[in-house]
C-alpha cells in the first residue's frame, strides 16, 4: 500500500536569520522543518518558536542520558511546541519510555512525538565493533528499532538502506524518517549512502530529510518544490 511521504527540510544554519530565510522559502513545499543541534545550540528555544511559525518543527537534539534527565529535557522542550523530538534508542528501554511518558504528560493531545535514532549512519561495522557492538549495523539497527518502538517511540530515524528491513521487521506502525536523500543528479556532499526521494517513498518512508540540496541551491524554493513534486508523483 502506498504511503504518503513528506518533505522535511534540514535548516542547518549557524543563526536564526539564515534559518528563517530558508524556512520561508521551503515552507510551501515542506511538511516539517528540522532544527538541529547547531541552530538550537546557537539560538536556543527561540529557534523552535520562530521556525514553528512557518511549519511544524522536527527538533533533532538526539537526547541520550539517564531516564530522569531525558524526561526532564522533554518536559522543558515540549512547551516550545516541537512536533517531533529525537532521542537515542541506545539509551535503553527505560529511557525511551521516560521520554514518551514525559511527552504525554507535557503535551496532551498535541504532544511532541518521540523519534528514536538507532545507529548513527556515521558508524560503520568497524567503528561499531570498537564500541563493543559485534554483528554489524543492520542487526544493531533492528535490535534498537524493536527496543525503541516496544518502549513507546512513535517512530525511527533511519538510513535509506534500513527502511525496507525495518518495515519488514516492525510493520506499518512506526513513522520512518530518512536523511541522506538526494534528488537524482545532485551532489552527495558527505552522505555516504544516498537514495532518491522517489526510492524512499516507494520503500515506505514517511518523511525524507533534505538539507543542502535545498538550502545551498541558487533557488531554495524551487529546489524544495521539485523534491516535493517528485514525492507526490
Ligand atoms: O544536507 P543534508 O541533506 O545532508 O542534511 C541531512 C540532515 O539530516 C542533517 O541535518 C544531518 O545532521 C541529519 N542526519 C543525517 N544522518 C543521520 C541523522 C541525521 O544526515 N543519520
Image (cartoon, rainbow, N blue to C red):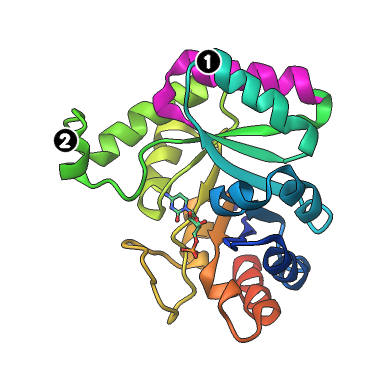
Q: In the image, is residue 92 part of the stretch drawn in magenta?
A: yes
Residue designated by label 2 = 129
Spatial separation of the CA atoms under disc 1 and disc 2 = 26 Å
Residue at 66 percent across and 66 percent down: it is 232
Residue corresponding to mark 1:
67
Is the residue 123 above or below the residue 18 in the image? Answer: above
Say whether residue 180 is left or right of residue 205. Answer: left
**Residue 106 vs residue 138, the one in the foreground:** 106
- x, y percent for residue 49: 80, 47
- Residue 150 drawn at (x, y percent): 50, 19
In this view of the protein, which residue sits in the foreground, 38 or 154?
38
Q: Is residue 100 above or below residue 177?
A: above
Q: Is mark 2 within 8 Å of ligand 1?
A: no
| Main secondary structure type of the part rendered in magenta | helix
Q: How many marks?
A: 2
Disc 2 on helix, strand or loop? Answer: helix
Amino acid at each position: 500500500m502506498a504511503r504518503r511521504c513528506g518533505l522535511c527540510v534540514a535548516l542547518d544554519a549557524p543563526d536564526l536569520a539564515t534559518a528563517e530565510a530558508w524556512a520561508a522559502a521551503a515552507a510551501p513545499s515542506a511538511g516539517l522543518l528540522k532544527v538541529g543541534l547547531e541552530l538550537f545550540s546557537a539560538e536556543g528555544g527561540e529557534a523552535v518558536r520562530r521556525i514553528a511559525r512557518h511549519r511544524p518543527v522536527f527538533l533533532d537534539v538526539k537526547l541520550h542520558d539517564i531516564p530522569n534527565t531525558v524526561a526532564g529535557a522533554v518536559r522543558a522542550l515540549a512547551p516550545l511546541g516541537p512536533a517531533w523530538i529525537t532521542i537515542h534508542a541506545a539509551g535503553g528501554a527505560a529511557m525511551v519510555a521516560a521520554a514518551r511518558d514525559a511527552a504525554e504528560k507535557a503535551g496532551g493531545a498535541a504532544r511532541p512525538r518521540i523519534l528514536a535514532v538507532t545507529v548513527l549512519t556515521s558508524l560503520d561495522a568497524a567503528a561499531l565493533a570498537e564500541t563493543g557492538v559485534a554483528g554489524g549495523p543492520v542487526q544493531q539497527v533492528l535490535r534498537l528499532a524493536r527496543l525503541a518502538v516496544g518502549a513507546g517511540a512513535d517512530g525511527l530515524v533511519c538510513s535509506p538502506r534500513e527502511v525496507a528491513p525495518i518495515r519488514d521487521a516492525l510493520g506499518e506502525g512506526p513513522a520512518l524518517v530518512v536523511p541522506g536523500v538526494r534528488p537524482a543528479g545532485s551532489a552527495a556532499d558527505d552522505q555516504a549512502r544516498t537514495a532518491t526521494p522517489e526510492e524512499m517513498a516507494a520503500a515506505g518512508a514517511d518523511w525524507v530529510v533534505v538539507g543542502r540540496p535545498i538550502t545551498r541551491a541558487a533557488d531554495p524554493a524551487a529546489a524544495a518544490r521539485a523534491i516535493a513534486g517528485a514525492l507526490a508523483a
